[in-house]
Amino acid sequence: MTKLRVGLLFGGRSGEHEVSIKSARAIATALSAEENVNKYEVLPFYIQKDGRWLAGEVSQQVLKSGVPLSNPQNSTSSESNDLSHAQQQALERWQSPPQVAEVDVWFPILHGPNGEDGTIQGLLTLMQVPFVGSGVLGSAMGMDKIAMKMAFEQAGIAQVKYKAITRAQVWSNPCVFPKLCDEIEAALGYPCFVKPANLGSSVGISKARSRQELEQALDNAASYDRRIIVEAGVIAREVECAVLGNDQPQASVVGEISFNSDFYDYETKYTPGKADLLIPAVIPDEITRKIQDMALQAFAAVDAAGLARVDFFYVEATGEVLINEINTLPGFTATSMYPQLWNHSGIPFPELVDRLIQLALERHNTSE
């Protein structure tokens, strides 16, 4: 039987470069498991932090070690000596390794900007090749928290109050900024959460409990993104549900995250022992069903495909369930919430990876 060649695309230019490598290592291990080893051949492609693509031995080395390259390497051997250094770098970023032509199906596992925001999905769509996960629209809407919230609102999915603002409003003249803070206080109160609209893994997020903290949080978020979202705080349990499929998606069991920090920030998320996952979450059956239904609604609202993890707030005091966000390319290590939710739902990690590849092929064939 001829093996399918899977282009495992990892690394990337976002702040989640290292997380992407961890996810790629887990996927490569799953593809070499007994049930998959005769079906798939892994072709690793490593995107350096400067945006250049590497394949072959160097990419294998990063995948094996789990450590990013400390010294960026050239992806081509161009002899254009008359080009400036900047021009040479730009030229190399536009040139793909020759192994790209050998790929049958792509598995992009690039977290954050330039990876799960529709950019790489647009490139793969132009290449007319199947790839795992959402397309351009689903990826872009799943990444942009403001567009996502608007889609949820249109679909009638309950969520926390929020206000969308821009960097220009934050970094405006001294007369405008205080009025903006007045509006946020009146609409949302304290505590509230200030987030860059287009960053993942809780990067740039701050909790504001006072006017001073709000001003600092807005300035901090504006340094990351020109679009910012401010959300009302809520006393609730944080629960998550995984979705798998294309036009007929399925929802997993529901899991809960517990932590001792003030909120689920980057350090808490990626430091071992700082957060606990409880699967399945100990919640009433009707709440579980409600969360699963809302997860499928959210998946459809942003036109997601393949996979997504949908995060919710369960307000136990009132029985309310409020959607927080959808993540169309969630963390994918063996201990990440998404694969763990499916493992507890009866789909072990190697089978999950196989299903995602088959879903990519199915979507590609039906869209032609």
Image: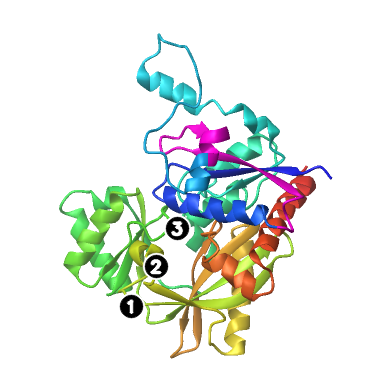
Which element is circle 1 on? loop
Query: Which of the numbered marks, if any, corresponds to residue 272?
Result: 2
Q: Quick check: 57 above or below 316?
A: above
Q: Amino acid at mark 1?
A: Asn
Q: CA distance from mark 1 to mark 2?
A: 13 Å
- Give the label on residue 236, or none: none
* Direction from residue 25 to residue 289 in the image, left or right: right
Q: CA distance from mark 3 to mark 2?
A: 31 Å
Residue for point 44% across, 76% down: 276
* Image coordinates for residue 115, horizontal then vertical, percent: 51, 46
Residue type at numbered disc 2: Pro
Frontmost residue, 29 versus 93: 29
Q: Residues within 10 Å of mark 2 (few under 14, many from 20)?
A: few
Mark 1 touches mark 2? (CB < 8 Å): no
Q: How many marks?
A: 3
What's the magenta region?
34-60
Q: Which residue is mark 3?
A: 146
Residue 35 part of the magenta-drawn span: yes
In the picture as drawn, the residue positioned furthest to the top comes out as 82
Q: CA distance from mark 1 to mark 3?
A: 28 Å
Check the image and report above or below for 153 versus 49. below
Give the numbered dot on residue 260: 1
> In the structure shown, which secondary structural element does the residue marked by tag 2 occupy?
loop
**What kind of element bears circle 3?**
helix
In percent of width and height, residue 59 lies at: 53, 38
